[in-house]
Image: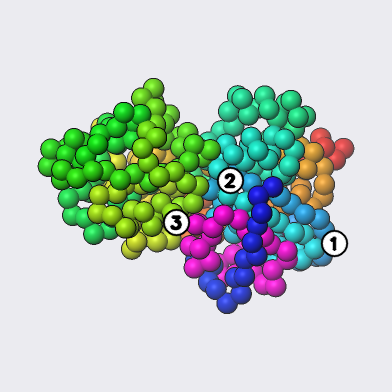
Amino acid sequence: MASSHDADTTGITRRKSLAALAGAGALGLAGCAQSSDGGDGSNASDGSDGGSDSLSGSINIAGSSTVFPLMSAVAEDFAADHPDVSIDVSSTGSGGGFSNFFCVGETDFNNASRPIKEEEKQLCEENDVEWIELIAATDALTVVVNPNVDWIDSLTVDELSQIWQEDPARTWDEVRDEFPNEEIERYGAADTSGTYDYFIENIMGEAGHTDDYQATEQDNTIAQGVTGSEYAIGYFGFAYYFQNPDQLKALAIDNGNGPVEPSLETAASGKYQPLSRSLYTYPSMSSLGEEHVAEFARYFVSQTTNEDLVAGDVGYVPATEETQESQMQKLEDAIEETQG
């Protein structure tokens, strides 16, 4: 799978660490010495044995850059309690993870910012990779501009489509008369990204997505491009903006009932439409047959309601207790099936 680099978080707060992780490409964890601030590594409920070193083995995780900071935070806490479990988390994009790693049997989990596609299901089936879908959190996909501009605060869904569709507006005043007659610079998710897929489905539809933009899987690259130009625009998951609110200006989105700003509250309430979305992780059934992978999966689901971690540290809406219970039951059924 994609190569990883060591993540040295000793002496770094969880929030600063996650701000860096949001733009990183991979994280390798081999049993951290201690849990970072804000985590709940000692509360390894629902199956994790909370500090025992009886578990050992490696876990490889690829997929969504949006889910990456959440998975990395959970993996960090789990590795702190289980020093003989090595966890590698890579940001490859949802589609890139499914096609290049998970559905060809190279990884144990694939993170995704949209549901698995039919062609990905087929690829998994061709390679005898069985999986289950687990809900991780709720995201508010965020549209950002340069923090110093005062001529834009919001866009309608139609205006957003004009900017990003296959045959897009060339200058800002083509979108709205009062906007400047300046060329639009675009920074966004690569076509291997679930965020890219979600954006097309919910904003542009059949109009497709322009090729006239800087495509990347790295949120910090999008942020750097937007902060470097007064006439740039970008989009990515809410977590990076949550960790770096002073670097960027988030636009309110008008879906017909007035502009609504992206936030944990508007995503949770359903007011931030159509850019609120569920986030997922997909463990493979064969991997769940290994005890250390099963325990990590249980721990991940147990942490999806951890408000300090999911909302406070990462910047997503935690799962409800009801959702967590249903996901844990789905997971336990899968583990029982694989482990007999």
Q: Which residue is mark 2?
A: 92
Q: Nearer the viewer, mark 1 or mark 2?
A: 2
Q: Position of residue 333 (x, y in %)?
A: 75, 37
Q: Position of residue 192 (x, y in %)?
A: 53, 38
Tell me the CA gap for discs 1 and 2.
31 Å
The amino acid on which the numbered mark 3 sits, given as a three-letter code, is: Asn
Say if 79 sits above or below 289 in the image. below
Residue located farthest toward the top when viewing the structure as drawn: 206
Answer whether residue 26 is magenta in the image: yes
Q: Which residue is mark 1?
A: 54
The quarter of the picture where residue 88 lies is bottom right
The amino acid on which the numbered mark 1 sits, given as a three-letter code, is: Ser
Q: Secondary structure at mark 2?
A: loop
What residue appears at the point 33 percent right and 63 percent down from the top-left corner?
Answer: 246
Q: Which residues are magenta?
A: 16-44
Q: Position of residue 27 (x, y in %)?
A: 62, 58
Tell me the CA gap for discs 2 and 3.
14 Å
What residue appears at the point 53 percent right and 72 percent down from the top-left corner?
Answer: 13
Q: Nearer the viewer, mark 1 or mark 3?
A: 3
Say if 20 sits above or below 223 in the image. below
The quarter of the picture where residue 30 lies is bottom right
Task: Report the front residue among 307 and 235.
Answer: 235
Q: Position of residue 62 (x, y in %)?
A: 64, 46
Q: Earlier in the sequence, mark 1 or mark 3?
A: 1
Q: How is the image coloured?
A: rainbow
34 sits to left or right of 311? right
The quarter of the picture where residue 177 lies is top left
User: Is residue 164 among the parts visible in the rendering?
Assistant: yes
Indicate which disc residue 220 carries: 3
